[in-house]
């Protein structure tokens, strides 16, 4: 029979727990330019050096956003992600957003479809079932 002292067992348990706590969770990489259609990327975004901007009249070709770390911007608003929770294929964000006319706190929900596409889910009951799909642009 294998006999382990209580302190040895406790040390082993703490060691294993430490390994589990230090392992990295692999969060979905949202960084980059995202458009409502892959064929719209060149009409919605322009790249100057390493900076991605919105093309003039980009709104005529569809929507999009650019994510860089905790900053997310569209043609009309800038948001800073204040919290992020990823559960399975869904990411919930709390963000502080500002446009030219107002500032607001916003809840955003994205469903990960694959590495290069996500759907924004609108949790408002008045918009139940509405989703808007975005595709990663290769810039």
Image: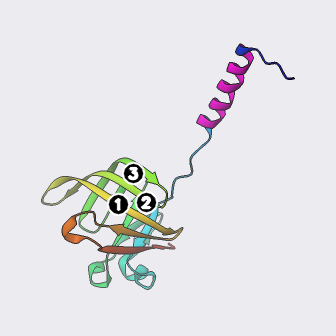
Which residue corresponds to the image point at 51% horizontal and 58% vertical from the top-left? 28
Apparent side of residue 48 relative to residue 80 in the rendered image (left or right) = right
Report which residue position mark 1 lands on.
109
Closer to the camera, 56 or 29? 29
Which sits in the foreground, 21 or 52?
21
Which numbered disc flags the more N-terminal residue, 3 or 1? 3
Coloration mode: rainbow
The earlier-in-sequence mark between 2 and 1 is 2
Seen as rendered, the residue at the extreme front is: 1
Q: Main secondary structure of the magenta part?
A: helix
98, above or below 3, in the image:
below
Q: Tell me what residue is drawn at x 34 percent, y 74 percent.
A: 132
Marks 3 and 2, the one that precedes in the sequence: 3
Q: Which residue is mark 3?
A: 70
| Res 60 label | none
The residue tagged 2 is: 90
Quadrant in the rendering for residue 109: bottom left
Image x and y of residue 88, in percent:
49, 57
Q: Please tell me which residue is depicted at 72% across the width and 21% down the height of the picture.
A: 9
């Amino acid at each position: 029979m294998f006999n382990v002292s209580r302190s040895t067992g406790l040390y082993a348990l703490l060691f294993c727990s430490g390994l589990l706590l230090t392992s990295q969770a692999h969060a979905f990489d949202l960084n980059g330019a995202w458009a409502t259609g892959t064929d719209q990327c060149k009409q919605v975004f322009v790249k100057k050096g390493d900076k991605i901007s919105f093309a003039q009249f980009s709104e005529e070709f569809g929507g999009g956003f650019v994510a860089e770390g905790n900053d997310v911007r569209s043609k009309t608003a800038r948001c800073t992600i204040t919290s992020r929770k990823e559960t399975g294929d869904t990411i919930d964000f709390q963000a502080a957003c500002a446009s030219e006319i107002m500032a607001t706190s916003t809840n955003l929900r994205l469903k990960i479809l694959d590495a290069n596409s996500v759907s924004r889910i609108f949790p408002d009951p008045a918009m139940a079932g509405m989703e808007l799909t975005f595709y990663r642009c290769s810039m």
